[in-house]
């Protein structure tokens, strides 16, 4: 018996297209380990029933995930997870998480509001990752920043 | 991407459809094509001809001009009658029948009747099968009418303002059932509404009628992608001159700022913010601007229509 493991939440006011919300929520579930290889994603019919989203929208999201190699359709059975996005460093028990938590409590101690912290994190993240060197995936591709 | 999936066979084609009542024209030269398997919103202001169009498709009315075809057949034919279900706005049901008798009528009249599908819809709303139609609330009556339409297992479902008397919870549930049924059986749906928010994420196809004619028709993603919302500082009394070579749908000036919905005819360059419109913005812009040039994308054009509108070149 297959149970439905994730249920999508579609925010109609967010301005983010529904198919992208499904892609993002699936990836988030893969990152957090809620979805693991072998799991079946809900069918377009099931998503339509729970969220009243057009089935073609769900299929479009699944095609996108398939293109990225994360899921695979099995004819007559559904769409299944192929690989996970989780890695040991992203769990809440990792040393990196502990360091971040310690930093957050320092920030709170210094009187920073949630928005201040979010702004700091965003700008540090921008500096680290936006230059084009994708250190996160260990890839060596560098995007030219010149015009 | 669009070719294989979207170019499919038409479920409905309208050719120069016109309908004249004593008070004047309700529909005029209305042409469009709805590919099979799509969920299409039929949008327009009150009195735009939505109900007339659906009634012609359901063979309740005969058009004054033009014709309509359902799966290649005329609306009156036995074949199209069997493949099509129509849910009228006033949800006509026999008031003295019970719910069970109403479903029995559906079973007797329709060879492909699906009793289980119909019963499931009734049961999900806890409507008693032995209750007389006349004792039901508006929402319950709508549910029975929807069960009757779904039980027929139509290939084309014509719905006239189906959700108008339902509360938000039931509305969401019924929409979910509708989309799930469509997903399972590949049903084509043509659904009129003037609640624009109801359409986002539900419809993948749109037909906008206003002033009796088609203003906008086509695949939703395609329609979105050929429009751009531009915001910036106004120039003198109006829009920046540099925007002039794009097709303007609607523009508004407020203070020093302008907002315009355009169909770009090339790169949009200038000190402006550009964004993709959402469905509501797109629909409102067309509904507010009856003089904007109509747009019917290739998959929504009937034979020979491309030239008439001069828009045969919209990229998918």
Image (spheres, grey):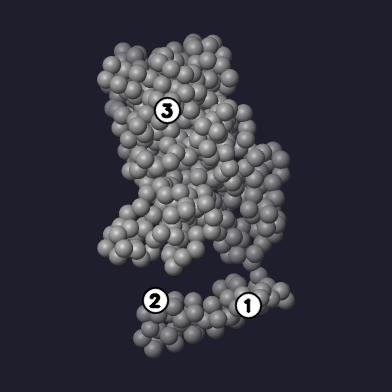
Please say if A112 is above or below A22.
below
Query: Which label sits on residue A81?
Result: none
Residue A84 point in image, percent of width and height: 66, 62
Residue B192 point in image, percent of width and height: 40, 32
Left/right placement of residue A14 relative to residue B141 reads right
Task: Give the alpha-carbon distance from disc 2 to disc 1, as whole Å.
Answer: 32 Å
Of B267 and A128, nearer the camera is B267
Q: Quadrant of the N terminus of chain B?
A: top right
Residue B25 point in image, percent of width and height: 33, 22
Task: Give the alpha-carbon distance from disc 3 to disc 1, as whole Å.
Answer: 55 Å
Of A4 and B7, nearer the camera is B7
Residue B92 point in image, percent of width and height: 35, 18
Q: Is residue B151 visible?
A: no
Q: In which quarter of the image is residue B124?
A: top left
Label 1 sits on a secondary structure element that is loop
Disc 2 + disc 1, Cβ < 8 Å? no
Identify the residue under disc 1: A146
Of B179 and B207, nearer the camera is B207
Identify the residue under disc 3: B159
Label 2 sits on a secondary structure element that is helix
Q: Which chain carries label 1?
A: A
Identify the residue under disc 2: A115
Task: Give the alpha-carbon distance from disc 2 to disc 3, as whole Å.
Answer: 47 Å
Please say if B213 is above or below A117.
above
Left/right placement of residue B23 relative to residue B232 reads left
Please say if B247 is above or below B25.
below
Give the residue at x 36% y 58%. Answer: B239
């Amino acid at each position: 018996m297959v149970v439905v493991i994730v249920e999508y939440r579609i925010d109609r006011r967010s301005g983010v297209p529904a198919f992208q919300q499904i892609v993002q929520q699936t990836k988030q579930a893969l990152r957090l380990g809620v979805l693991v290889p072998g799991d079946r994603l809900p069918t377009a019919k099931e998503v339509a029933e729970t969220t009243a989203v057009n089935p073609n929208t769900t299929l479009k999201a699944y095609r996108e995930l398939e293109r990225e190699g994360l899921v695979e359709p099995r004819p007559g059975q559904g769409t299944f997870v192929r690989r996970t996005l989780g890695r040991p460093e992203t769990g809440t028990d990792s040393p990196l998480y502990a360091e971040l938590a310690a930093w957050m409590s320092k920030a709170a101690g210094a009187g920073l509001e949630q928005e201040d912290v979010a702004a700091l994190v965003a700008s540090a993240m921008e500096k680290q990752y936006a230059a084009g060197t994708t250190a996160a995936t260990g890839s060596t591709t560098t995007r030219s920043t010149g015009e | 991407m669009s070719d294989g999936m979207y170019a499919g066979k038409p479920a409905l084609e309208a050719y120069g459809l016109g309908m004249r009542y004593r008070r004047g024209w309700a529909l005029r030269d209305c042409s469009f094509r709805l590919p099979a398997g799509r969920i299409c919103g039929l949008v327009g202001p009150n009195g735009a001809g939505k109900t007339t169009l659906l009634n012609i498709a359901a063979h309740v009315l005969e058009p004054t001009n033009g014709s309509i075809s359902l799966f290649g057949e005329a609306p009156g034919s036995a074949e199209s009658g069997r493949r099509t279900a129509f849910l009228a706005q006033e949800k006509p049901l026999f008031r003295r029948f019970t719910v069970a008798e109403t479903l029995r009528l559906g079973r007797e009249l329709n060879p492909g009747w699906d009793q289980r599908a119909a019963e499931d819809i009734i049961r999900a709303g806890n409507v008693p099968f032995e209750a007389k139609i006349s004792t039901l609330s508006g929402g319950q009556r709508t549910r029975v009418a929807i069960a009757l339409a779904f039980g027929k297992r139509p290939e084309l479902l014509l719905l006239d303002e189906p959700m108008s008397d339902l509360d938000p919870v039931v509305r969401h549930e019924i929409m979910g059932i509708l989309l799930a049924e469509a997903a399972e059986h590949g049903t084509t749906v043509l659904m009129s509404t003037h609640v624009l928010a109801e359409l986002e994420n539900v419809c993948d196809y749109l037909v906008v009628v206003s002033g009796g004619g088609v203003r906008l028709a086509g695949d939703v993603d395609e329609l979105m992608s050929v429009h751009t919302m531009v915001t910036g500082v106004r120039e003198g009394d109006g829009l920046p001159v540099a925007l002039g070579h794009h097709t303007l749908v609607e523009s508004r000036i407020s203070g020093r700022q302008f907002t315009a919905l355009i169909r770009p005819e090339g790169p949009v360059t200038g000190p402006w913010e550009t964004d993709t419109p959402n469905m509501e913005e797109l629909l409102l812009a067309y509904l507010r601007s009856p003089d904007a040039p109509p747009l019917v994308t290739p998959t929504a054009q009937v034979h020979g229509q491309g030239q008439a509108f001069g828009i045969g070149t919209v990229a998918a």
